[in-house]
């Protein structure tokens, strides 16, 4: 229904930012690092209730994230292919997809344009999904285009992975990778499925019926239908530039 469109777009933006953060933190394979795996991604609220559960499939040059939308809005799939310089966003319910170039150069410029500083406090060690992790509290202040935001996040970081296995935001929302399978996911997870119809923008990916009549200017998406602006989850670092 029309009233759910802002929710769908908000979730799409958040999921896209997280997917990019996960993918961009995964660089070339290093000794001792686990760069190819699959896992459940579980998000819980401040009371411990599961609000979202999806899947992550990772290889050094490609990534897939399956996200279940809230309020029975279905699912969304994001596939990133560095090897093809492409990314796809899929709506399995409508069998539609949006395709764009993987604009790593634009993401690099975005991060270079951000002034930020970070204070870390080590809180100890804990095991997450069977992996010993350093638990730390990270306080980050970011200034973008004159606007400053400060946030405190708790991270559980394993030296086996390039991203935290668990993170907790200052409002208590926890994102965690569980049931990690240390095996390269099959090629089929990173291919565009047959029978899907291509749309011109991410707006069109979730617009049907009455939604399609809404003015695109009301959307949070860019006018060209490309990647939205975003900030990485605190504690993530890109494999280029000075982070």
Image (tube, rainbow, N blue to C red):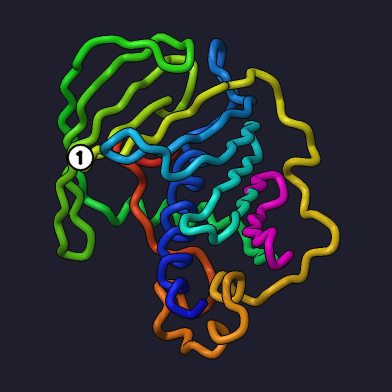
Q: Nearer the viewer, residue 156 or 176?
A: 176
Residue at disc 1, secondary structure: loop
Q: Residues within 10 Å of mark 1 (few under 14, many from 20)?
A: few
Vertically, is 169 above or below 92? above
Magenta segment: 80-95
Vertically, is 34 above or below 206? above
Q: Position of residue 123 (x, y in %)?
A: 19, 16
Vertically, is 81 above or below 44? below
| Quarter assignment of residue 10 | bottom left
Left or right: 235 with respect to 5?
A: left
Vertically, is 224 above or below 135? below
Q: Position of residue 106 (x, y in %)?
A: 46, 59
Q: Is residue 123 visible?
A: yes
Q: Position of residue 47 (x, y in %)?
A: 28, 36
Residue tagged by mark 1?
Answer: 170
Left or right: 220 with respect to 59?
A: left
Q: Is residue 236 visible?
A: no
Q: Position of residue 127 (x, y in %)?
A: 38, 11
Does the segment drawn in magenta span residue 123? no
Q: Residue at x 43, y 25 (%)?
A: 165
Residue that lies at the very extreme toward the right in this rendered image: 194
Q: Residue at x 80, y 54 (%)?
A: 193
Q: Residue at x 32, y 40 (%)?
A: 45
Q: Residue at x 62, y 28 (%)?
A: 38
Q: Quadrant of the C terminus?
A: top left
Q: How many marks?
A: 1
């Amino acid at each position: 229904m029309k009233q759910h469109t802002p929710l769908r777009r908000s979730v799409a933006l958040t999921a896209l930012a997280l997917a990019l953060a996960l993918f961009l933190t995964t660089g070339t394979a290093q000794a001792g690092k686990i760069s190819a795996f699959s896992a459940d991604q579980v998000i819980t609220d401040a009371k411990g209730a599961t609000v979202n559960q999806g899947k992550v499939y990772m290889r050094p040059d490609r990534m897939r994230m399956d996200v279940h939308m809230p309020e029975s809005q279905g699912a969304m799939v994001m596939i990133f292919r560095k090897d093809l310089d492409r990314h796809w966003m899929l709506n399995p319910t409508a069998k539609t997809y949006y395709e764009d170039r993987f604009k790593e150069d634009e993401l690099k410029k975005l991060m270079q344009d951000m002034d930020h500083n970070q204070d870390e406090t080590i809180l100890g060690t804990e095991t997450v999904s069977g992996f010993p992790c350093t638990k730390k509290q990270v306080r980050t202040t970011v200034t973008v285009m004159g606007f400053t935001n400060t946030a405190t996040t708790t991270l559980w970081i394993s030296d086996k992975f390039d991203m935290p296995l668990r993170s907790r935001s200052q409002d208590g929302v926890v994102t965690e990778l569980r049931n990690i399978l240390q095996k390269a996911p099959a090629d089929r997870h990173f291919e565009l499925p047959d029978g899907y119809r291509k749309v011109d923008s991410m707006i069109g990916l979730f617009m049907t019926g009455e939604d399609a009549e809404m003015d695109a200017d009301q959307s949070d998406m860019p006018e060209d239908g490309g990647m939205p602006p975003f900030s990485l989850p605190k504690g993530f670092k890109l494999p280029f530039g000075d982070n």
